[in-house]
């Protein structure tokens, strides 16, 4: 079982993050976890067919933090980035090395930890999503939707999809493979 | 400076902008997004053309940052430049999408002009005397097509669809106007040449906005994707009318199961041919109301046989 504390200094190991973003993602993730669980919480992390356990620890958010992250959709989105990047690093050994903007958000490009910052020719794109209250089947449905979008050519391949189900304690990684 | 340095600078600024946005400081976020966009555009210029994937991602990123900064004019400027160059397929589609969104949501606070299409279904009841159902139906259809009053309007109309459509940016209307005029005039020149028979003079009808949209392959976006964008064609044709380059006829629908009037368009040159065919000034059932610019008058005409 891997154990990790939500880290506001994620940018020190993920060169694609800034300090300000790392702090935001850690705060939002703590609010998302606080909605359903008490620390520590054990999550199942599925990377294709391999299951690993990830025990997450965090400081309970205070009232000011909860008020600042009152928008449920924005918080789930930002919290998902924080949790998925933590699991990606801990369980798969990949980190976010680059960031590029999209119409409604941003994409992170990932590479093995320690490889350093490269250009975007060889990186994989990480597509992140979060399900707040849904069941495991909701999480897998979201994974399928993201893969389908990528295959339809709405985004640039190759890609890895990472979806967290906050309440159901599940994190799923699935590569996008064009047939 | 290299792509790496410019892009790294842009990433840092964009990250700070996003953090500001998440904390609710939208004005500071927009300023920061603008600085990130400038850095990303510089990164794009510094790229080796062989780095196709990086070029596509950076192009989309720069355009998205201009959009997030609320700088529509810069989105359209850079977008037009990018469309002239070569981008990977995924980036072309995203560039198009960002340009469309930016053009249609010019500012979240400013008023925007929309055209709203309301489609409804109305039930009317006619009372007719006939020998059987078939003939009764035919009689009633004839009354309906000629606009006769029904004995009963059977309750309220049923709403079928309401579709708000954001009007286009001025540059696209200019291009649409040009394309519509070219299609209209070329069509007329072809049919006038093919039908030039002085012993059996015939003149083809003018065209409707729907026909123009279909021939120019203008399709509606969004949920109605695939259907002809008649409103877009009508907008271009109405502008040609205002500029007196095209005339507009209104004429009764003649097909079965249709009622009301249809607007038809042709050039003044084609109108001259139609006018030369007038043989009966009192044939009111074939009257054409013609609009040229803001002027409107009626021609009583009977098509040549």
Image: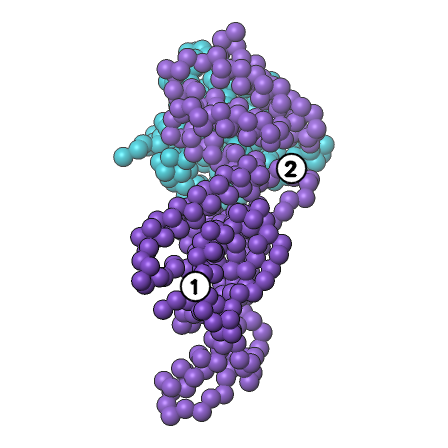
Chain colours: A cyan, B purple
Q: Vertically, is B239 above or below A152?
A: below
User: Around disc 1, counting alpha carbons within 10 Å, would you say few (fewer than 14), some (14 to 19), or many (20 or more)?
Assistant: some
Q: Nearer the viewer, residue A115 or A47?
A: A115
| The one of B107 and A130 positioned closer to us in this rendering | B107
Residue B218 appears in the figure: no
Q: Which residue is mark 1?
A: B277
Earlier residue among tags 1 and 2: 2
Give SS at disc 1.
loop
For residue B107, which numbered disc appears in the image? 2
Residue, far top:
B1
Residue A127 position, x and y percent, is 45, 31
* Point 59% across, 62% down: residue: B297
Q: Quadrant of the C terminus of chain B?
A: bottom left
Q: Is residue A79 above or below residue B262?
A: above
Front residue of this view, candidates B235 and A159: B235
Figure check: B12 above or below B77: above
Q: Residue B247: percent from the left, percent from the top?
A: 52, 54
User: Is residue B11 among what the camera can see?
Assistant: yes
Disc 2: host chain? B
**Residue A115 placed where, x, y %?**
42, 11
Q: Residue furthest right?
A: A64
Helix, strand or loop at mark 2: loop
Write the residue at 51% across / 34% down. Answer: B98
Question: Same subunit under labels 1 and 2?
Answer: yes
Please state which of residues B94 and B283 is positioned toward the viewer in this rendering. Answer: B283
Chain of the residue where label 1 is placed in the rendered structure:
B
Question: Can you name the residue that lies furthest to the left here?
Answer: A179
Residue B298, position as x, y percentages in the image:
56, 65
Q: Quadrant of residue B153?
A: bottom right
Q: Residue at x 43, y 41 (%)?
A: A142
- Drawn side of residue A81 relative to residue A126, left or right: right
């Amino acid at each position: 079982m891997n154990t990790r504390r939500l880290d506001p200094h994620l940018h020190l190991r993920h060169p694609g993050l800034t300090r300000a973003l790392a702090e935001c993602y850690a705060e939002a993730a703590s609010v998302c976890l606080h909605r359903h669980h008490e620390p520590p919480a054990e999550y199942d992390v599925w990377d294709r067919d391999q299951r690993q356990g990830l025990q997450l620890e965090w400081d309970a958010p205070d009232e000011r933090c909860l008020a600042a992250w009152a928008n449920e959709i924005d918080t789930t989105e930002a919290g998902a980035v924080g949790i998925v990047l933590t699991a990606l690093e801990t369980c798969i050994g990949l980190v976010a090395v680059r960031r590029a903007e999209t119409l409604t958000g941003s994409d992170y490009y990932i590479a093995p930890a320690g490889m350093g910052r490269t250009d975007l020719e060889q990186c994989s794109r990480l597509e992140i999503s979060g399900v707040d209250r849904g069941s495991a089947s909701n999480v897998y449905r979201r994974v399928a939707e993201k893969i389908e979008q990528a295959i339809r050519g709405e985004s640039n391949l190759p890609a890895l999809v990472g979806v967290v189900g906050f309440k159901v304690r599940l994190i799923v990684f699935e590569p996008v493979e064009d047939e | 400076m290299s792509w790496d340095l410019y892009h790294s600078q842009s990433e840092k600024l964009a990250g700070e902008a996003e953090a500001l946005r998440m904390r609710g400081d939208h004005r500071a976020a927009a300023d920061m997004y603008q600085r990130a966009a400038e850095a990303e555009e510089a990164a794009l210029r510094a790229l080796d053309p062989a780095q196709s994937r990086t070029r596509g991602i950076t192009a989309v990123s720069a355009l998205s940052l201009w959009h997030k900064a609320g700088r529509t004019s810069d989105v359209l400027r850079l977008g037009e430049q990018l469309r002239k160059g070569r981008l990977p397929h995924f980036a072309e589609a995203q560039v198009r999408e960002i340009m469309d969104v930016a053009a249609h949501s010019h500012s979240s606070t400013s008023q925007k002009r929309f055209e709203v299409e309301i489609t409804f279904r109305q039930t009317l009841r006619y009372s007719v005397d006939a020998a059987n159902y078939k003939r009764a139906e035919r009689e009633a259809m004839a009354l309906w097509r000629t606009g006769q009053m029904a004995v009963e309007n059977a309750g309220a109309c049923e709403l079928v669809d309401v579709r708000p459509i954001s009007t286009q940016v001025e540059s696209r209307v200019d291009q649409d106007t040009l394309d519509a005029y070219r299609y209209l005039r070329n069509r007329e020149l072809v049919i006038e040449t093919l039908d030039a028979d002085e012993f059996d003079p015939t003149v083809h009808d003018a065209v409707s906005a729907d026909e123009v949209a279909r021939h120019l392959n203008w399709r509606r976006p969004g949920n109605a994707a695939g259907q002809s964008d008649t409103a877009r064609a009508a907008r271009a044709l109405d502008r040609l009318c205002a500029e007196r380059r095209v005339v507009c006829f209104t004429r009764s629908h003649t097909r079965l199961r249709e009622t009301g009037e249809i607007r038809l368009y042709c050039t003044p040159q084609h109108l001259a041919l139609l006018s030369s065919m007038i043989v009966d000034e009192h044939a009111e059932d074939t009257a054409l109301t013609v609009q040229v610019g803001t002027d409107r008058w009626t021609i009583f005409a009977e098509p040549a046989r």
